[in-house]
Image (cartoon, rainbow, N blue to C red):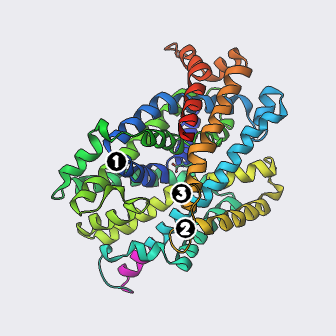
Amino acid sequence: MKKQSQWKSSTGFILASAGSAIGLGAMWKFPYMAGIYGGGAFLLMFLLFTIIVGLPLLIMEFAVGKMGQTYTTKIYEKLTQKKWLNIIGWNGNLAVFILFGFYSVIGGWIIIYILKVLGQLIGLSSGNLSSIEFEAIITNPWLTIMGQGIFILLTMVIVMMGVEKGLEKASKIMMPLLFIFLIVIVVRSLSLEGAQSGLRYILQPRIEDLSVKGTLFALGQSFFTLSLGTTGMITYASYASKEMTIKTSALSIVIMNIVVSVLAGLAIFPATEAFGFKPADGPGLLFKVLPQVFDQMAAGSLFYFIFLILFLFAALTSSISLLELNVSNFTKNNNEHRARVALIASVLVFIISVPATLSFGSLNDVRIFGLTIFDAMDFLVSNILMPLGALGTTLVVGQLLDKDALKESFGRDRFKLFSPWYYLVKLVLPLVIILVFIMQLI
Ligand code: TRP
């Protein structure tokens, strides 16, 4: 009896945190980053960082959540009795707020594509999928602002109604379906003429393509896909019961993230080469390449439409948890003001997301340290706030928390992994993060 219920709750925990972690990061951002920073070399660095740095940090965040059992702008105080350390939670809160701002730009693109493809399917517009003009869409201010507005609105309504549970149930079907679709796209993409060179591009690490910058972005990508440093994963683990095994949960999420990232790469790069696109095309890569692949399939428009719905779903399970973090921090887990806080947070997110959208069009000239507004927001979150948040938590865990209590949270330790993990988090990883930070400044 006991075993059964334990298993059930662990699965729920894994599904919910996987739904939150797996989103645009693996499917959209990974191929876009890999295409700019050296393909196979980027993939290799991303894998190394995800396993050596990401996995132990994810276990750390789960351990903290499981120990603290409260919302993240309070949890550090609760664990250490030092109020000022809540700043790590607020750093995460700021990170998810800005993250939602630029996430919604891409969510908006998905919605616009859904509407365009729907238009073609019901005969409102003609042409095939490849005729959908990406540049014309992203430079159209009203269209993109409407798209991201709908994305934020959808997220808000779901959070306000508190129907996340229903969504988690749906994700049991939607996520595996998305996975199957990805595999189908990979197969089609690999069978295109000229796919070989794209396959080589993403799988073969060419060390000469590895730059310091690419290495830094590979680390940023690991943080981004695993939601590290934003306290999102701490929140999920704070609902976990004592029996839950955080190690296997963390490992499952890491593996799922890697698999989806690699599949996205295998779906996109062979087709990129086959259709004569440049891998370093930037944030639009997925949106430009995939319609071409679907155009090569029977009933391609219909399948592309379904794929986009699944993709939107994956993005929404993430954006909901982004908004939810803000809501739970400001309502302090008290549901009374939930709707109002969700509304205010969404409006604020919408306001900051507008310049991010416009930076693909009329505000493209505005540069912050040489980056567009969209890129600057992404950089601030992925390369600064997330690593800072993770660094703060490693210091708390390594220097302030009681080792025995941590060990208990770590759970049953058949393979004697606690000590290596503990010293990695206490001594090595803070130095790695600091080193990366210094390199970034130079
Ligand atoms: N990991 C998410 C993705 O890949 C993005 C993300 C980062 C996130 N931090 C988060 C999502 C916190 C929810 C909560 O798309």
How many numbered circles are shown?
Answer: 3
Q: Ligand 1 near label 1 (Cβ, under 8 Å)?
A: no
1 or 2: mark nearer the eye: 2
3 or 1: mark nearer the eye: 3
**Label 3 environment density (alpha carbons within 10 Å; few <14, some 14–19, many ≥20):** few
Spatial CA span between label 3 and label 2:
13 Å
Q: Which of 188 and 241 is in front in this view?
A: 188
Q: Mark 3 points at which residue?
A: 370
Residue, x 61% and y 28% (percent of image)?
60
Which stretch is magenta?
114-124
Residue 86 sits above or below residue 318 on the image? above
**Label 2 environment density (alpha carbons within 10 Å; few <14, some 14–19, many ≥20):** many
Earlier sequence position, callout 1 versus callout 2: 1
Could you tell me which quadrant the C terminus lies in? top right
Q: Name the residue under label 1.
A: 263
Q: Name the residue under label 2.
A: 359
Magenta-drawn stretch contains 194:
no
Q: Nearer the viewer, residue 101 or 332?
A: 101
Given the image, on which type of amino acid does mark 3 rest?
A: Gly
Q: Ligand 1 near label 2 (Cβ, under 8 Å)?
A: no
Residue, x 48% and y 54% (percent of image)?
24
Q: Is the magenta stretch mostly helix, strand or loop?
A: helix
In the rendering, at what x and y percent does residue 420 appear?
53, 16
